Amino acid sequence: MSAPRPSITAVLPGDDPAAISHAAELLRAGGLVAFPTETVYGLGADALDPIAVRQIFVAKERPVDNPLIVHVADVAAARRLVREFPPLAERAAEALWPGALTLVLPRAAIVPDATTAGQDTVAIRVPAHPVALALLHACQCPLAAPSANRSGRPSPTLASHVSADLDGRIALILDGGPTSLGLESSVLDLCHARPLLLRRGGVTHEQLVALLGPVDCVEAAEGAVLARSPGLRHRHYAPRAQVELVAEGEGEAAAARALAAGERVALICRRVVVSPAIVRRLPETLEGFAQALFATLRALDDEAVERIIVEAVPETGVGAAIMDRLRRAAAG
Ligand code: AMP
Ligand code: MG
């Protein structure tokens, strides 16, 4: 059954049990509810209801060939969605769930084409956020939940980001405050001989290698392998302003060039800098930088900035995921 499209989107506190019950009812009736996870806010629908799931694509204006991540409460619920839960999945789930790791596995017949974009695989994760887990327990169904933004925009790390993109298009937003990681989950494909990291995210490549042995990265792959992650083909993470990625230490010079060309310019970096541009200094730790990045890009859009210059960060740990997002934002 499909719920009618709401004209006003309610925002309720995620830590209120009555709000969770109401959200679960809406979801069971085929509605859309945005909720916080530890990565970014997700836009949820009953993953086993193709009509509800199609509404996610409509609300987000998401390309229909980009499959959704299915969120479940625990490993037992994940097993019901797959034909096989191989030993590496066992090991990854044991060590990293609940957490920012999504596993791509052979899908069971109950998972509809709408959720997997017709693929024979399904992406699954157990989120760590208490509001997400409370909602999953209350609604008693797996939730398909991509990031709760309009397609192409930076992922939402605050309830107000969800409102800005989806107000009037979804029934309800559960507000859980700022998300702690600020970056999406890592997506790991376990359907082939060697694990393949399709998207870098909150769990690092280093962590996965230490746990599972060799893990290939999609950047090093090509052709047939790239086809396994449809989302990679689409424009992503981009604010309205033009993003320009420069090496650390080159921000002031890049800002000066853009200012001379008459642009309204902002500079994002981890250093103390003196520049006539709008300067947003983010935390020096990569975790702190990741947490603040998407919110900073959105805030600069709100200030009508035309060009955002971002200084590169080291590509170790979560820095690799940050640089992936920045390169995509700059390509947008
Ligand atoms: P989002 O939900 O917006 O965080 O995006 C989900 C990401 O997971 C996209 O990059 C998708 O392409 C990827 N994904 C979801 N399901 C699958 C799947 N079955 N196979 C490969 N990648 C997937
Ligand atoms: Mg997304």
Image (cartoon, helix red, strand yellow):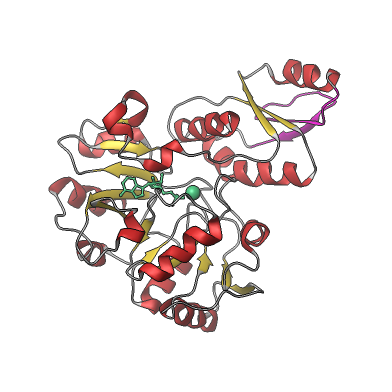
The residue sitting at 43% across, 63% down in the picture is: 54
Q: Which quadrant of the figure has residue 306? A: top right
- Is residue 194 visible from the viewing direction of this image? yes
Above or below, 162 against 309 in this view is below
| Viewer-closest of 297 and 112 | 112
- Is residue 126 visible from the viewing direction of this image? no
Q: Does the magenta stretch include residue 34?
A: no
For residue 206, side relative to residue 132 (left or right): left
- Tell me the quarter of the image containing the N terminus: bottom left
Q: Specify start and end residues of the magenta stretch as a single range.
A: 262-282
The residue sitting at 30% across, 27% down in the picture is: 223
Q: Where is residue 327 in the image (x, y as percent from the top left)?
A: 53, 29
The residue sitting at 35% across, 40% down in the picture is: 229
Q: Where is residue 208 in the image (x, y as percent from the top left)?
A: 29, 38
Q: Which quadrant of the figure has residue 222? A: top left
Q: Is residue 268 magenta?
A: yes
- Tell me the quarter of the image containing the C terminus: top right
| Viewer-closest of 129 and 171 | 171
Q: Position of residue 149 (x, y in %)?
A: 57, 54
Q: Position of residue 81 (x, y in %)?
A: 23, 63
